[in-house]
Image (cartoon, helix red, strand yellow):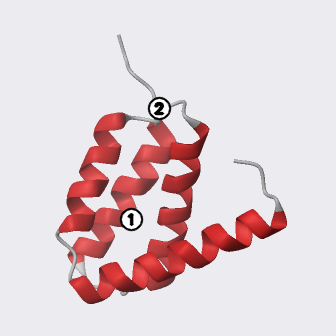
Amino acid sequence: MRVLLDDEATLCSVEILAEAVEMAFVPGILELRTLRDALHEALKNRSPAAVRLAYSAYSRIDREFRDRISHHALTLATQRRLRGVPK
């Protein structure tokens, strides 16, 4: 039996984080590419294992990049909330 993510809030958060990673992405930094790919995989397959892999990749990224990604993600989430984009 395959377990899928079906919680819309979680999927929305993963989508926002994936977009934030794209905004902060710097070619040549393996950890960012790993995180980007893991987030895309999580969205594609809705797999809890892919989300755990993305979390692991995020935790290995340099603090400066985590701060940058977090800033972009908070900005994107605020913009979505203000526009009333459904989750």
Residue 74 placement (x, y as % from top left)? 54, 74
Q: Nearer the viewer, mark 2 or mark 1?
A: 2
Residue sitting farthest toward the top: 1
- Viewed as shown, does residue 25 lie left or right of 49? right
Q: Residue at x 42, y 78 (%)?
A: 69
- Relative to 73, residue 67 above or below: below
- Viewed as shown, does residue 51 lie left or right of 72? left
Q: Residue at x 72, y 65 (%)?
A: 80
Q: Residue at x 52, y 55 (%)?
A: 13
Residue 25 visible here: no
Label 1 neighbour load within 10 Å: few <14, some 14-19, many 20+: many
For the residues labelled 2 and 1, the Cα–Cα distance comes to: 18 Å
> Which numbered dot is residue 36?
1
- Relative to 8, residue 6 above or below: above
Q: Amino acid at mark 1?
A: Arg
> Which numbered dot is residue 5?
2
Residue 63 visible here: yes
**Viewer-side residue, 82 vs 76:** 82
Residue sitting farthest toward the right: 83
Q: Quadrant of residue 34?
A: bottom left
Residue 44 placement (x, y as % from top left)? 50, 42
Q: Disc 1 on helix, strand or loop?
A: helix
**Viewer-side residue, 14 vs 33:** 14
Q: Amino acid at mark 2?
A: Leu
Q: Say which label, 2 or 1, has the lower sequence index.
A: 2
